[in-house]
Amino acid sequence: MINFLAGRLAVAVPTLLLVSILVFGLQKLLPGDPALALAGEDRSPEIIAFLRAKYQFDQPLPVQYWSWLSAFVQGDFGLSIRTRLPIGTMIAEKLPVTIELATLSMLIAVAIGIPAGIIAALWRGSILDHAVSLFGLAGLSIPSFWLGIMLILLFSVSLGWLPSGGYVPFFENPLGNLKTMAMPSLVLGAASGAIIMRHTRSSMLTVLKQDFVRTARAKGLSEHVVVVRHALRNGLIPVVTLGTLQFGQLLSGAVLTEQVFGIPGFGKMIVDGVFSRDYAVVQAVVMCAAGFFLLMSLLADLAYAALNPKLRG
Amino acid sequence: MSQVEILAPSVPVRTRTGWERLLREPAALIGGGIVLAFALMAVFAPWVAPYDPNASDWSAIRLGPTLAHPFGTDDLGRDVLSRIIFGARASLAAGFLSVAIALAFGVPFGLIAGYFGGVVDIVISRLTDALLACPFLVLAIALAAFLGPSLQNAMIAIGISAMPIFVRLARGQTLIVREEDYVSAVVSLGASHRKVIISHILPNIMPPLVVQATLTTAIAVLAEASLAFLGLGQAPPDPSWGSMLDAARQFLVEAPWMAIWPGLAIVVVVIGFNLLGDALNDVLNPRD
């Protein structure tokens, strides 16, 4: 297991370094003087001078990259042009909001996706299977921001049950927090649930055809025991890894959902950064999102190794 | 009569071609029909649309659906149906062109990595891993933001973000095909690397690429709508389904139809591409 983990880390670290080169390279796409572009709307000489000194634009590219990377590794992600706050502080404030949203969404996704996938596999070809497949197709095809708008129309505008947006911290008002998070979590959870459902169905169909399931049935075990103890335990191994990766992907999905519902999270941070041409914020968000995704991939690999008897030894 | 003669079929067995099998798949017919209908609508938009999509009628602001305006009008008195018909141009162009960009760069890199292996493979694969580590939409937003907001830049951003999917797929498939006997045979006959890759490997890795390209077009249409929703796509006043949805958010109470129809258009087109992709997968990769 330690060798396995070391092997995965040996791939993840250079990958993250390459991501940093790509993210650093983004600012080279900006036309004209990068200091002027990075300053966004704020063209005050102090800001431009500060940016020139900070990013060493008069130095060769490798020196610029090295100084950018060293600051980044030490947690200095730069200063937001819009808020004048350190970007690291902004991320620390906004990340927990998005992690809460992603966690609630994942709970919904798992609660919908796994039972639906199992039902579809057990009753393959039935109306239930077709209904579940339709849900899967819809989940992959409905844009999250449109689903969000439609839910606002239904639950906020027509029925008046839930607030159309905003955010209340959980420790300030738990009920208010859950009310504001209900629709965004459902929007994000539905899309992930569809993906988890498709994989659960396909994985269960594969497992149900295996010899050990046939043997379990031949031994006279009840269908419930065969499904729960034998098929499910094996069929869910790839789903656990997929679920972990999906959690990493939820950060990406959160961008639009947070924008629609006005949730001040990590995803909305990149949108605000784009609107105010706060390019350093955009770079920091991409870098952190990639780092988070790589961490989740690593956890997914570890979960797979821990659950798969062939790799456990 | 010998046993061999009895078993031999009297009529030569003709296996169905890919097209014939595809045309027997209901999902392919529905998906293909949807895509074709929207493509025709986009091409013939000036003849199909009842109004100029950018023409404001100040006497018809936020009118609900009527016979004159079946999908209603927007906050500037423009016909929503006409804007959806013209908006298909931006969505489909972004879908097709960004996937073309992803294919044009992704497939050659994947072929080279899979065929040559060694250092070239390591470099290309690690770069691909780095791109794949950046969540698709986050990368597309960042690229579109740095390139500047326009439909063209949105297509480039989506194309670059989708590229690693094709590098990885083409590489994996090349690794399999490279080991086939017919490839070893043409190599031993002295064929150049270029000839082997273009004439012998590429045609044999096409089926999974076609399936992936169709499914990625669905993702690209969604991504274009997302970028336009964030103001990083088609510049106003030209219509785009994503920007129409963005404008509609302010008038959810007064004019919900402004939000309903563009979203439905996106859903239907994306379902079309997904159905077509799934059917192509069933026909071209039956083992999956």
Image (spheres, coloured by chain):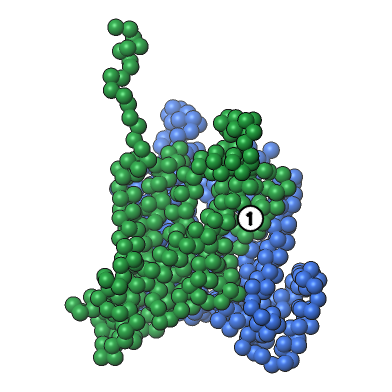
Chain colours: A blue, B green
Which chain is home to disc 1? B
Residue B144 shows up from this direction: yes
Q: Residue at x 33, y 17 (%)?
A: B8
State the image coordinates of residue A122 (x, y, percent, origin top left): 39, 42
Quarter of the figure with residue A267? bottom right
**Residue found at the very far top of the displayed protein:** B1
Res A12 → quadrant: bottom right
Outermost residue, left side = B67
Percent x, y for residue B165? 55, 54
Q: How many numbered marks does the figure carry?
A: 1
Q: Amino acid at mark 1?
A: Thr
Q: Position of residue A213 (x, y in %)?
A: 47, 33
> Is the N terminus of chain A in the top left, top right, bottom left or bottom right quadrant?
top right
Front residue of A245/A185: it is A245
> Horizontal and vertical percent for residue B125?
66, 51
Tell me if residue A133 comes above or below residue B268 in the rendering: above
- Position of B86 compared to A63: left or right? left
Q: Is residue A77 left or right of residue B72?
A: right
